[in-house]
Image (cartoon, rainbow, N blue to C red):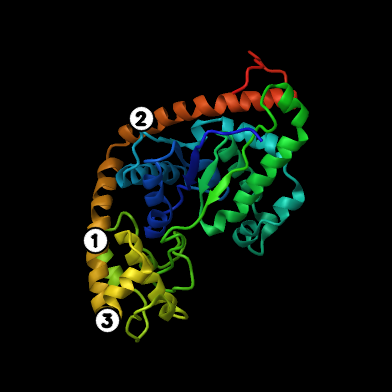
Amino acid sequence: MAAFKELVFSGVQPTGNLHLGNYLGAIKRFVEMQARSECLYCVVDLHAITLWQNPAELRSQIREVTAAFLAAGIDPKRSIVFNQSQVHEHAELAWVLNCVARLGWLNRMTQFKDKAGKDRENASVGLYDYPVLMAADILAYRATHVPVGEDQKQHLELTRDIAQKFNNDFAESITAQGHGEGFFPITEPLIGGPAARVMSLRDGTKKMSKSDPSDNSRINLTDDADAIAQKVRKAKTDPDALPSEVAGLGGRPEADNLVGIFAALRGSTREAVLAEFGGAQFSAFKGALVELAVESLAPLSAEMKRLVADPAHIDAVLADGAERASAIAAPTLDAVKDIVGFVRRGRTSRPV
């Protein structure tokens, strides 16, 4: 297999309010990664329309996610920030990969079953084919690493299967075109971190979600200090004091969730939090969590609002990012066309 330059790709869907789980599980990690890797961060608006979206709201949400990236500290000069629909190579490569992926692979994808529910015959083809487009998002840049949550791990495994099958199916052509023994990398998932899975404030057994009908189940990134404080104080807990050791959180999902949130916001560990608060009642712990959450999130919320109020600036960031992203993806797609045997304008056999 050829050696590949390290490159990180990840994306966030512009559907509904971004919340604390999106920030701790993804966006905060994006900021940390840009200090040590070349990164592309994408607002995946093509994925968003697998379910019907109000066009005006979608446009607004694309800008809101971009504002969250920037407010959190992603530097659009250091990293590439763009929205997926501005880079046509994603959709073109997805078609080629559709012809590599196997129907049986997609039939095993559990997220489609969850999202389509009982009425699968009414689900869009796009929702079913979502994982192949995700593979194209990643492989258009020949990304080596992708930070993902546990719920996307199966899709990353599919990306790896598609890349491997493409490399095997076209091995002779790949070598003839001068790309060595493999064209696509076998991308590594980056799963984990202190808050890889932030749970609902109303039910510690369910993931914090944009789609939960209760706004009190999540802290939105647009919430002000008063809203943050109110939601933390109303968060579901149990009557027992906090344990002194992590093992004591077993069977206590709400306690475990709040301790995990505290640790992630502080950049600490559950062990360190319990060493400080073990034996404390939740009333005292929630007071400290309110202070930490407001300190961490209120400036982010204020900066997001400032950025959203300047859509021309956000659109300029996205346009610049799309141009830079396309400069990487276009040669990849050209090479793929050569490898599979298409005739194209301006054909070159020079490896990318």
Q: Is residue 261 above or below residue 345?
A: below
Who comes first in sequence, dot 1 or dot 2?
1
Q: Which residue is mark 1?
A: 294
Residue projecting furthest to the bottom: 239
Q: Which residue is mark 3?
A: 280
Tag 1: amino acid: Val
Q: Which mark is residue 217?
A: none
Residue projecting furthest to the top: 346
Asked whether the residues under the numbered discs 2 and 3 touch, taking CB atoms below 8 Å apart as contact, a structural biologist would say no
Q: Which residue is mark 2?
A: 316
Q: Is residue 105 left or right of residue 130?
A: right
Tag 3: amino acid: Ala
Q: CA distance from mark 2 to mark 3?
A: 49 Å
Q: CA distance from mark 1 to mark 2?
A: 30 Å
Tag 2: amino acid: Ala
Q: Nearer the viewer, residue 179 or 224?
A: 179
Q: Nearer the viewer, mark 1 or mark 2?
A: 1
Who comes first in sequence, dot 1 or dot 3?
3
Q: CA distance from mark 1 to mark 3?
A: 21 Å
